[in-house]
Image (cartoon, rainbow, N blue to C red):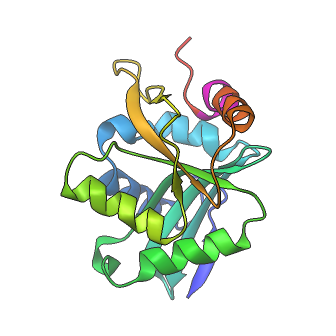
Amino acid sequence: MNRISITGNTHAKFPEVWELYLSAFPYPEQRSPEDMVRVCAHKDYHLEAWVEGEELLGFIEWWHCGNLRFIEHYAIHPNHRSSGYGSRFLQEWLNASELPVLLEIEPVIDDITRRRQIFYHRLGFKDNPDIDYWLPPYHIELQVINLWVMTYPGFLTEADYALFKQKLVREIMPSFE
């Protein structure tokens, strides 16, 4: 099993990763194909896939944000879910990170969102309930989305959050101006 860097939308594995991305995340949480081209060219954007032979097992899409790493999307192929790959891959990735990590989850309102929160808790992520977080829209016709912030290995400071929000608004999310 190997972790490979997908260096752009022309990479041989990109179409397969893109297909998993589209199936794993709802439309309000997806980039347009044009915006994906934009972020793939950004120096701080990283897309990594886990493969076994030629088979895609999953991917992680993350940003270097100066003082932390931001996991934007993380998915395991449906054929490999509930097999331990999700925990194993993310734990290996966290262990290799020299920086704190931030991710966002949907508010916990049902069994599915509770299981997602528990999954991240088992890996050492912390809830940051004092942060009122609204994700800017991925598409011009949509509204902001209220999400919860989780961080690893500790809690997020107000200063780090302020720096992250600046990068999120200025570079990570699409601009509709």
Residue 107, quarter of the rendered image: top left
> Residue 39 or 135: which is nearer the viewer?
135
> Residue 91 or 72: which is nearer the viewer?
91
Q: Main secondary structure of the magenta part?
A: helix
Seen in the image, is 177 located left or right of residue 114? right
> Which quadrant would the N terminus be assigned to in this image?
bottom right
Residue shown at the point (62%, 35%) measured from the top left = 172
Residue shown at the point (53%, 33%) measured from the top left = 131
Seen in the image, is 122 located left or right of residue 7? left
Q: Is residue 154 at all visible to an observer of this figure? A: yes
Residue 10, quarter of the rendered image: bottom right
Seen in the image, is 139 located left or right of residue 99? left
Residue bounds of the magenta highlight: 167-172
Residue shown at the point (38%, 40%) measured from the top left = 29
Task: Give the percent coordinates (x, y) of residue 59.
Answer: 50, 66
Residue shown at the point (43%, 56%) measured from the top left = 18
> Residue 64 or 33: which is nearer the viewer?
64
Examine the rendered structure and indicate whether residue 38 appears above or below residue 68. Answer: above
Task: Give the percent coordinates (x, y) of residue 51.
Answer: 51, 80
Task: Give the percent coordinates (x, y) of residue 117.
Answer: 38, 58
